[in-house]
Image (tube, helix red, strand yellow):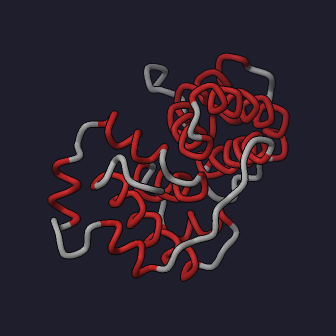
Amino acid sequence: MSGLAPSEDDLIAAARGGDAAAFEAIVRLHGPAMRRVARAITGDDALADDAWQDAFVAAHRALAGYRGQGSLRAWLLAIVRNAARKLLRERSGHDDEPEVFTLGLAAGWGEASPEDVAVASRDRAQLWAALDRLEPDDRELLVLRDLEGQSGDEVAAALGIALSAMKSRLHRARLRLLAALTHPGGPR
């Protein structure tokens, strides 16, 4: 049994006890997802790195208070979301949300199907460039739900909104992403 990797619960217990290697293992395990979420929220690599680092410092300090309700990953993603939003609030505001019909037209309804556009947009650089053109709330939602694969309930809970509101926002965010992929030089 000594050849088996420690479980996440074992890592948490060891990290709580001051084991730096255990906390480093947690960072290796969840760090990439946290970095992607920070990048999605901030839209800026340097700011995302700052948020990611701030989040791990906060997580290390708060680990003793982690009660295991929900997954460690969801807890860490909530911390990085808060850190990224805090940094972002210092730098930006938000535009008013356009109507769904306007978003649909911008996304190219009546032109190519969403599936065709998604297949044509496989290049990660193109996808991230399109995500960067979105508002931070849209990027955050898309990364949590579509890239990190959190359930609708988990995302709604993380955002502090009802599941129905999350679904509505997700629909609009996907339309905005489709518009950004379809018309890279067009307006936001």
- Describe residue 13's horizontal placement relative to residue 133 as left or right: right
Q: Position of residue 89 (x, y in %)?
A: 77, 48
Q: Residue furthest top?
A: 21
Residues 23 and 86: in front is 86
Describe residue 175's horizontal placement relative to residue 67 as left or right. left
Locate residue 165, reporting x and y percent.
58, 79
Q: Residue at x 56, y 64 (%)?
A: 154
Quadrant of the image for the N terminus? Answer: top left
| Camera-side residue of 59 and 88 | 88
Picture residue at 15% right of the left edge, 59% below the top = 116
Residue at the image position 20 percent from the left and 56 percent from the top: 117
Percent position (x, y) of residue 22?
65, 23
Residue 63 occupies quadrant: top right
Compare residues 92 and 59 and report the one nearer the observer.
92
**What's the residue at 72%, 47% (across, down)?**
92
Q: Position of residue 71 (x, y in %)?
A: 60, 52
User: Looking at the picture, does residue 128 appear above or below residue 117?
Assistant: above
